[in-house]
Amino acid sequence: MDIPPVIEDKESRNSIHPDDRALLEDAIARTMETPGAIGPTIELRHRHKDGSWRYMEATGKAIRDESGQPVVIVNMRDISERKRAEEALQAAHRQLMDIIEFLPDATFVIDLERRVIAWNKAIEEMTGVKKEDMLGKGDYAYAVPFYGEPRPVTIDLVLEWDTEGTGQYEFVKQEADALLAASYAPMTYEGKGAHLSGKASPLFDAEGHVVGAIESIRDLTEQKQTEEALRSRERELEDKSVNLEEANAALKVLLRHRDEDKKTLESTVLANIRQLVFPYIEKLRSRSLTDGQATYLNIIESNLNDVISPFLRKITAMYAHFTPMEIQVADLIKNGRTSKEIGELLKIGMGTVHTHRNNIRKKLGLSNEKMNLRTCLLSLQD
Amino acid sequence: MNTDDDSADSHRSKELKAEYYRSLIDNVSDIIMVAGPDGVVRYVSPSIERSLGHTPSDRRQGIAQ
């Protein structure tokens, strides 16, 4: 070698990062193999005088120096800044991807070519399709795990509004840039299917150009089931309340019947005692009785009166069965008015007054002519 | 470029040309290096100072003159 090496081999090697030395040696060897052609471009770390490592980009070409010796002419530039920016960008990108990855909502992102560039954990769970099998796929592949066929979905409507496409959704709502749509996806959850709502928004670059779109999908099945349960509960309650109303009406009728039956029974007992028992007591009394017999007879009569007295009190309610005219007539009789006076007061004929009297007697169970109507009415007063 | 001037003129012209190319190399921002097949660096341009802090003379670099 005519030209002595000006740098100690050791020193030269030490200025290259140990991990990058093999790469450099390989690049030099390959460059030497093809004289005259530009060799591979490599990135390597070179030590700065201050001791730090700088990223360098280097490429070389094998030529011959003026003495005909083969040498490599190397063109190297500092790319540390670019590297740092790239790493910062990658870190930011990774961070964004991590955020998307762990979003609780099933989420995916597509680029302008409609290729999937993010497919998070929640959507893996919803569809059963792993991100490895979805990333980079286009041609509406992302619709298959939902609907069983490749077709435009909400996220596509964001990039390209298609009024026909909106027909397959239960509803589509526009909120600024975003689109909200709901539909049933039969293929989700291993074919169990789910009611889903998807919200899709376009993604913009720094200049405001659309560069892709993101869609987050929420499972509405539980909400729908709750709503359905509430509705059926409501229907059940309605049915029950109708049943209760019917039962209530039936009970009311029964109670009224019972009441009427009781009244009928009471008035029958009352009437029977008055018509079939008291007349005979009167007849007995008119016979010549011994003192003892007369006493017994009085006791019988008094006891019988005791028996029927609760009915008598109740019978006041029987005024309810009276017509307004009958109530007026009964009132006047009680006050000791004669039929003639009643007729004049109420401006009705004597015949009519008699008809009312008879009706009142009938209603009170006083068919027996001998019973005085006024006495009876007075006895009802308490 | 190739003229049939007399040798003195030719020599002078070659020197000027070399000077011209050297100044080109010295002033590019990229680092230009010449390495032997053994990987030993024989020349490195002054721009190394800006990128890596070393001066060519620090490392006694440069083609021997």
Image (cartoon, coloured by chain):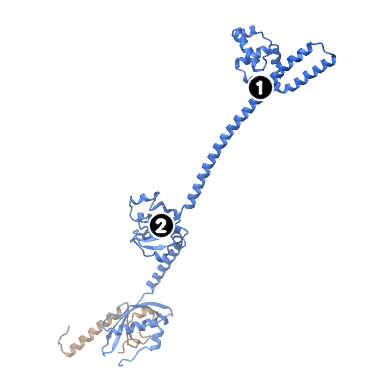
Chain colours: A blue, B brown
Q: Which residue is painted at 82% across and 17% down in the image?
A: A295
User: Marks 1 and 2, Cα distance to the nearest angstrom?
Assistant: 76 Å
The N terminus of chain B lies in quadrant: bottom left
Residue A364 lies, with reference to residue A105, above or below; the image says above
Residue A310: give x, y in percent of width and height.
Answer: 72, 23
SS state under label 1: helix
Residue A245: give x, y in percent of width and height.
Answer: 56, 35
Give the numbered dot on residue A71.
Answer: none
Q: Name the kind of residue labelled 1 in the image.
A: Ala
Residue A171 lies, with reference to residue A18, above or below; the image says above
User: Is the residue marked by circle 1 packed among few (<14), some (14-19), or many (20+) residues within 10 Å?
Assistant: few
* Mark before the other along the chain sequence, 1 or 2: 2
SS state under label 2: helix
Asked whether A104 or A93 is in front, the reply is: A104
The C terminus of chain B lies in quadrant: bottom left
Residue B8 lies, with reference to residue A119, above or below; the image says below
Asked whether A205 or A292 is in front, the reply is: A292
User: Are discs 1 and 2 located on one and the same chain?
Assistant: yes
Looking at the image, residue A63 sits to the left or right of residue A131; the answer is left
Asked whether A152 or A190 is in front, the reply is: A190
Asked where in the image residue A39 lies, by quadrant, the reply is bottom left
Give the numbered dot on residue A146.
Answer: 2
Residue highlighted by disc 1: A317
Residue A180: give x, y in percent of width and height.
Answer: 40, 52
